[in-house]
Image (tube, grey):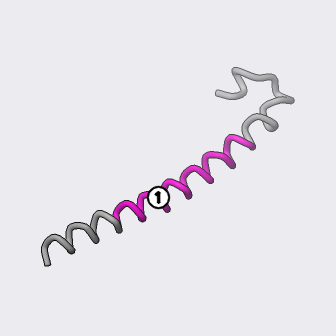
Amino acid sequence: MAGVLFTTSQVGAIILPLMFFHQIQLMVCAVLARRYADQQFSAVTSQAG
């Protein structure tokens, strides 16, 4: 898709930062999801006990 939108010489310079950003985004979202899940689990167990 990038090859259609951009010239061949520009594709690497555009795609590489996007690939890094996407990987960082996935890692940050995984950490946040784990924290929110732990908070929810703690809230549910404290109410039950």
In the foreground, 8 or 35:
35
In the foreground, 33 or 2:
33
Dot 1: within a 10 Å radius of its alpha carbon, few (fewer than 14), some, or many (20 or more) residues? few
- Location of the N terminus by quadrant is top right
**For the view shown, which residue lies furthest in the right direction?**
9
For the point 54% across and 53% down, which residue is it? 26
Q: Is residue 35 shown left or right of residue 7?
A: left
Q: Is residue 21 shown left or right of residue 25?
A: right
State the image quarter where residue 14 is shown.
Answer: top right
Magenta segment's dominant SS is helix
Vertical side of 35 occupied by 18: above or below? above
For the point 16% across and 70% down, which residue is it? 47
Q: Where is residue 38 in the image (x, y as percent from the top left)?
A: 35, 68
Q: Position of residue 6 (x, y in %)?
A: 76, 23
Is residue 23 on the magenta stretch? yes
Q: Is residue 43 shown left or right of residue 11?
A: left
At mark 1, the secondary structure is helix
Q: Position of residue 28 (x, y in %)?
A: 55, 56
Magenta region: 17-37
For the point 50% across and 54% down, which residue is it? 29
Q: Label 1 belongs to which residue?
A: 32
Vertical side of 16 occupied by 1: above or below? above
- Which residue type carries mark 1? Leu
